């Protein structure tokens, strides 16, 4: 990687690969002039790395002018001013390392509030940013109507053996189609506003620090999926990943329970930043955000299972079916705990 280091003019003291992310390859670089994060962008997932580069720079330039004190992961330019380096078919970018740590799972409800506040703040502080200046990095990423269409296609063309053994799960997902109708009505409503949206609000995409025993979220990271979008994407992804103590990989469905306190803290944190920005119509769909995202992920998992694991892949036979059952159970628990 010496060729990459030379483009930044780094005198490198040490390199450590970080293994937390699943998409990009990430390295912690210590140099004589400071510490950096270097990433190789997975261009098989993100087909247009230059679009991501343009988005991060556009947001960074806006924040420099409008909110210079906001903690943001600015891209570091090379010696000739580029913030994206193409080298041997790969794309690299660097960030100045921010002192902090990320979590893989939540330990307590306060972390949900802190993280939700940071994601809300990110959207709020960019409320005057012209979303027409953002490029789409993952087309139709959170398009529930498309995901249901893909589900139907898998029902018609998928693995017949897997279709036969998935009938109960399929029937439940079909029974929830009203959520697709609600989604369509939502996105076409005049009071549903597109904003700068992160789209991947799992807990590992927030940096924390701790001072005097008090843990605080300090900024959001991993901006590859930042695009124009609706608040239900960010709130929904937090609901899907924050409210249950076990992950989407859990096989024992009895362990899938909603922690109501986490919901209350998540809502408090997000609305502390976005209360005055959301329309009444949007606020009325705050709970729907959780239903929307959990349901969509269940559809995606079972669709992939029926399509022989062509998208997510599988480490063992039936993994995506297990994931789908997990999300179906999570949706049921969400409906029981939050709505009823």
Image (tube, grey):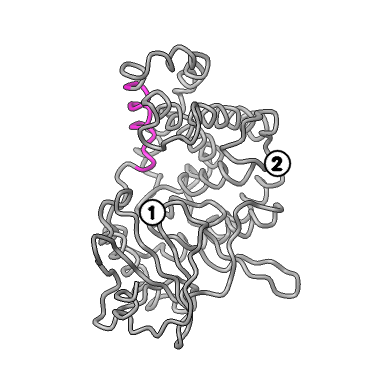
Q: Is residue 143 magenta?
A: yes
In percent of the image, x 53 and y 34: which residue is there? 291
- Quadrant in the picture for the N terminus: bottom left
- Quadrant in the picture for the C terminus: top right
Secondary structure at badge 1 equals loop
Disc on res. 103? none
Q: CA distance from mark 1 to mark 2?
A: 28 Å
The image position of residue 337, as x and y in percent, is: 68, 33
Q: Nearer the viewer, residue 213 or 94?
A: 94
The image position of residue 152, as x and y in percent, is: 35, 21
- Image marks 1 and 2: residues in contact by CB distance under 8 Å: no
Disc on res. 260? 2
Q: Read off the residue under disc 1.
A: 225
The image position of residue 292, as x and y in percent, is: 48, 35
Q: Is residue 207 above or below residue 317?
A: below
- Hey, which quadrant is residue 81 in on the image? bottom left
Q: Residue furthest top?
A: 164
In percent of the image, x 31 and y 18: which residue is there? 157
In percent of the image, x 49 and y 38: which residue is there? 293
The earlier-in-sequence mark between 1 and 2 is 1
Secondary structure at badge 2 equals helix
Q: Residues within 10 Å of mark 2 (few under 14, many from 20)?
A: some
- Depth check, mark 1 against mark 2: the one in front is 1
Q: Nearer the viewer, residue 277 or 144?
A: 144
Q: Nearer the viewer, residue 215 or 86?
A: 86
Please give the range of residues in magenta: 141-153
Q: Residues within 10 Å of mark 1 (few under 14, many from 20)?
A: some
The image position of residue 105, as x and y in percent, is: 63, 51
């Amino acid at each position: 990687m010496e060729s990459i280091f030379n483009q930044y003019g780094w005198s490198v003291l040490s390199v450590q690969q970080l293994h937390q992310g699943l998409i990009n390859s990430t390295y912690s670089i210590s140099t004589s002039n400071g510490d950096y994060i270097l990433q190789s962008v997975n261009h098989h997932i993100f087909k247009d790395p230059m679009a991501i580069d343009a988005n991060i720079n556009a947001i960074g330039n806006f924040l420099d002018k409008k909110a210079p004190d906001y903690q943001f992961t600015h891209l570091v330019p090379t010696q000739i001013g580029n913030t994206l380096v193409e080298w041997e078919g790969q794309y690299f970018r660097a960030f100045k390392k921010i002192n902090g740590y990320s979590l893989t799972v939540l330990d307590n409800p306060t972390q949900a509030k802190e993280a939700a506040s940071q994601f809300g703040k990110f959207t709020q502080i960019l409320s005057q940013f012209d979303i027409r200046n953002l490029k789409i990095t993952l087309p139709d990423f959170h398009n529930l109507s498309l995901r249901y269409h893909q589900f139907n296609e898998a029902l018609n063309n998928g693995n017949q053996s897997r279709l036969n053994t998935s009938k109960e799960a399929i029937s439940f997902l079909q029974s929830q189609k009203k959520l697709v109708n609600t989604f369509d009505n939502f996105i076409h409503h005049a009071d549903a506003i597109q904003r700068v949206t992160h789209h991947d609000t799992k807990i590992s995409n927030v940096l924390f620090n701790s001072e005097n025993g008090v843990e605080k979220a300090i900024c959001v990271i991993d901006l590859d999926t930042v695009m124009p979008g609706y608040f239900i994407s960010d709130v929904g992804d937090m609901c899907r990943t924050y409210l249950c103590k076990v992950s989407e990989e859990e096989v024992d469905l009895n362990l899938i329970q909603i922690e109501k306190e986490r919901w209350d803290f998540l809502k408090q944190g997000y609305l502390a930043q976005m209360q005055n920005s959301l329309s009444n119509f949007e606020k009325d769909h705050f709970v729907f955000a959780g239903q929307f995202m959990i349901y969509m992920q269940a559809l995606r998992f079972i669709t992939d299972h029926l399509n022989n694991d062509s998208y997510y892949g599988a480490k063992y036979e039936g993994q995506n079916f297990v994931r789908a059952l997990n999300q179906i159970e999570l949706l049921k628990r969400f409906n029981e705990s939050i709505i009823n």
